[in-house]
C-alpha cells in the first residue's frame, strides 16, 4: 500500500511543493499532507485508507457533502452528452438564470476560477469608469491576479507593495490597500485620489483572515460612498456565496441595496471549476462581445461543470441551509466547550454558517488583518494535528473558515466531539 509519505514524496519530486495550490501544503502546521483518494458525504479517505471527517469541503464547494447522488447523476448525464463543445450550450443560460433568481443580478458571465472572476470584475470597474485605482482591504483574498496580490500595504491609502515575487510594483501601485472595517480610511482615500478610484472590491464577509464579519453598516457604507463618487462596488462572494446563507454574505444583511458586481465561485460549480462575475446589465454589458472590455476562456461554461453547479444549487434547499446552520452552531459550541475545559483563551467569529477560531483573542475582537495576525497562531498546529490524529480533517491554517456540509450527520459530529478534547489539550500545551 502506498503511504501518505510516499505519495507526497512522489508528488513533490515533480510538482512544486507537492501541491497544486499552496494552501494544501502543511507549511504552517508542519508534517506531511495526507493524499486523498476518495470522498463521500462528510468524509475523505487517504491513500492509507484512513477516513477523516472533512471540515474543508474542497475549500467551500461541497455544500451538499461529497459525491451527492443528484450531483453525480447530473454529471454522468452531462458526460454522456459530450465533454466540451466550445460553443454556446443551454446549460449555461439555465445556471445563469438560476443564479439570477437567487441573487440580485441581471447578467452572469461564467469563468473557471474565482481568480478570473475578480480579475474580470476589476477590469470591468476600470472599463466602466475610465479610472485605474482599486481599493481592496488588507486580509481580504481575491485570488492570485497581480493587482490583487497586494494585502501587505499598511498605512492609509498606501499604494500597495506586491505580496509575491514576480508581481511588478507598477501593477500593485494601482491598488490601494486599506484596513478592513475602517470607514474613515475609505473616506480619506476618496479625498486623496479624487476621480481616480475605479472601484472597491471587498469580501462580503471576509473569511480569508479567519472570519471577520463586517461591522454593521460597513458594506452599505461602501455601497453609498462608491455611488457618491461614481465608482464601481464589487462584492466578492466566491467563498461566501450560496454558503454563508442561501444568499451568501449579502443575504445576511437583508440588503436594501446591491453592489454593481458580484463574483461567485466554489458552490456554483459543486466541485467542478466554475466561477462567475455577475451584476447589473449596465456594467456587465460592457463585456465583449457586446462591449469593449475583453474577457474569454476556452473551457468557460463547460457543460459538465454547468451540470454540477445546477444540480448543487437546485438541491440547496431551505432544509439544506437549516441543517448547515444547525451543524455549524453545534460545532462552534463543541469547540468552545472543549477549549474552555482546557482554559484556552480563544474566540469564535462567524458570518452565517461560516466560522473560524482565533487563539488568545477572547478580550480583543478580531476586526481587521492586524488584529487577526496578532493572535496566538502557534496554538493551531498542535490543535490541527491532534484533530487529524482523531480522524478530523481541518484546514491546515488558522486563517481559514471551517466548512460544514449538509451531509455532516450525528455520526460525523460524534467523531469530531471525540477528537476535540485531545486537540484542546494540545492547544493549551503549545
Ligand atoms: N475570492 C475569494 C473570496 C476566495 O476565497 C477565493 C479562493 N479561496 C478566490 C477569490 C479565488 O478563487 P480561485 O481559488 O477559484 O481562483
Image (spheres, grey):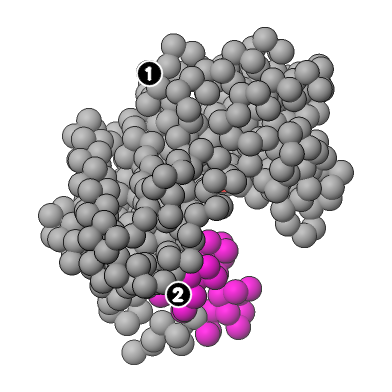
Q: Nearer the viewer, residue 395 or 97?
A: 395
Q: Residues within 10 Å of mark 1 (few under 14, many from 20)?
A: few
Q: Is residue 205 visible?
A: yes
Q: Which one is earlier in the sequence, the residue at label 2 or at label 1?
A: 2
Dividing the picture into quadrants, the one containing residue 339 is bottom left
Left/right placement of residue 410 relative to residue 113 reads left
Q: Residue at x 35, y 79 (%)?
A: 47
Outermost residue to the left: 410
Q: Taking 158 as reference, is 379 above or below it?
A: below
Q: Residue at x 48, y 66 (%)?
A: 378
Q: Residue at x 30, y 76 (%)?
A: 389
Q: Position of residue 345 (x, y in %)?
A: 36, 55
Q: Nearer the viewer, residue 92 or 147?
A: 147
Q: Position of residue 258 (x, y in %)?
A: 50, 17
Secondary structure under badge 2? loop
Left/right placement of residue 427 relative to residue 50 reads right
Queried whether the magenta region covers residue 390, the answer comes back as no
Q: Taking 174 as reference, is 15 above or below it?
A: below
Secondary structure under badge 1? loop
Residue pointed to by mark 1: 254
Outermost residue to the right: 170
Cα–Cα span, label 2 and label 1 = 40 Å
Q: Position of residue 410 (x, y in %)?
A: 12, 55
Residue 33 disc label: 2
Which segment did they paint magenta? Answer: 9-37
Q: Position of residue 374 (x, y in %)?
A: 55, 53
Dividing the picture into quadrants, the one containing residue 176 is top right
Q: Taking 237 as reference, is 62 above or below it?
A: below
Q: Is residue 300 visible?
A: no
Dividing the picture into quadrants, the one containing residue 385 is bottom left
Amino acid at each position: 500500500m502506498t503511504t501518505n509519505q510516499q505519495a507526497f514524496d512522489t508528488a513533490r519530486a515533480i510538482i512544486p511543493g507537492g501541491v497544486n495550490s499552496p494552501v494544501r501544503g502543511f507549511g504552517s502546521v508542519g508534517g506531511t499532507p495526507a493524499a486523498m483518494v476518495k470522498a463521500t458525504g462528510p468524509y475523505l479517505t487517504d491513500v492509507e485508507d484512513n477516513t477523516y471527517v472533512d471540515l474543508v469541503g474542497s475549500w467551500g464547494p461541497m455544500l451538499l457533502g461529497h459525491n451527492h447522488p443528484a450531483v453525480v447523476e447530473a454529471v454522468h448525464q452531462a458526460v454522456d452528452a459530450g465533454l466540451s463543445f466550445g460553443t454556446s450550450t443551454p446549460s449555461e443560460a439555465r445556471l445563469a438564470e438560476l443564479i439570477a433568481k437567487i441573487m440580485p443580478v441581471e447578467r452572469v458571465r461564467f469563468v473557471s476560477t474565482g481568480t478570473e472572476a475578480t480579475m474580470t470584475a476589476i477590469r470591468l470597474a476600470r472599463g466602466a469608469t475610465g479610472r485605474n485605482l482599486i481599493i481592496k482591504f488588507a486580509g481580504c483574498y481575491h485570488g492570485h491576479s497581480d493587482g490583487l496580490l497586494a494585502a501587505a500595504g499598511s498605512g492609509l491609502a498606501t499604494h500597495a507593495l506586491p505580496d509575491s515575487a514576480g508581481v511588478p510594483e507598477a501593477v500593485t501601485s494601482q491598488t490601494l490597500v486599506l484596513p478592513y472595517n475602517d470607514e474613515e480610511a475609505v473616506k480619506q482615500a476618496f479625498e486623496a485620489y479624487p476621480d481616480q478610484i475605479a472601484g472597491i472590491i471587498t469580501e462580503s464577509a471576509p473569511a480569508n483572515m479567519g472570519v471577520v464579519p463586517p461591522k454593521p453598516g460597513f458594506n452599505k457604507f461602501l455601497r453609498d460612498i462608491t455611488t457618491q463618487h461614481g465608482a464601481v462596488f464589487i462584492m466578492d462572494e466566491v467563498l461566501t456565496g450560496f454558503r454563508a446563507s442561501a444568499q451568501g454574505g449579502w443575504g445576511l444583511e437583508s440588503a436594501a441595496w446591491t453592489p454593481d458586481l458580484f463574483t461567485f465561485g466554489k458552490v456554483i460549480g459543486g466541485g467542478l471549476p466554475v466561477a462567475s462575475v455577475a451584476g447589473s446589465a449596465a456594467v456587465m454589458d460592457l463585456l465583449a462581445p457586446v462591449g469593449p472590455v475583453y474577457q474569454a476562456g476556452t473551457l468557460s461554461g463547460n457543460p459538465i461543470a454547468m451540470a454540477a453547479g445546477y444540480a448543487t444549487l437546485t438541491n440547496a434547499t431551505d432544509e439544506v441551509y437549516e441543517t448547515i446552520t444547525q451543524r455549524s452552531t453545534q460545532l462552534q459550541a463543541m469547540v468552545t466547550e472543549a477549549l474552555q475545559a482546557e482554559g484556552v483563551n480563544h474566540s469564535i467569529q462567524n458570518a452565517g454558517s461560516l466560522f473560524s477560531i482565533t487563539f488568545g483573542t477572547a478580550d480583543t475582537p478580531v476586526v481587521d488583518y492586524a488584529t487577526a495576525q496578532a493572535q496566538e497562531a502557534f496554538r493551531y498546529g498542535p490543535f490541527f494535528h491532534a484533530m487529524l490524529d482523531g480522524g478530523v480533517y481541518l484546514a491546515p491554517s488558522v486563517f481559514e473558515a471551517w466548512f460544514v456540509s449538509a451531509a455532516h450527520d450525528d455520526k460525523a459530529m460524534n467523531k469530531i466531539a471525540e477528537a476535540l478534547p485531545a486537540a484542546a489539550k494540545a492547544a493549551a500545551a503549545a
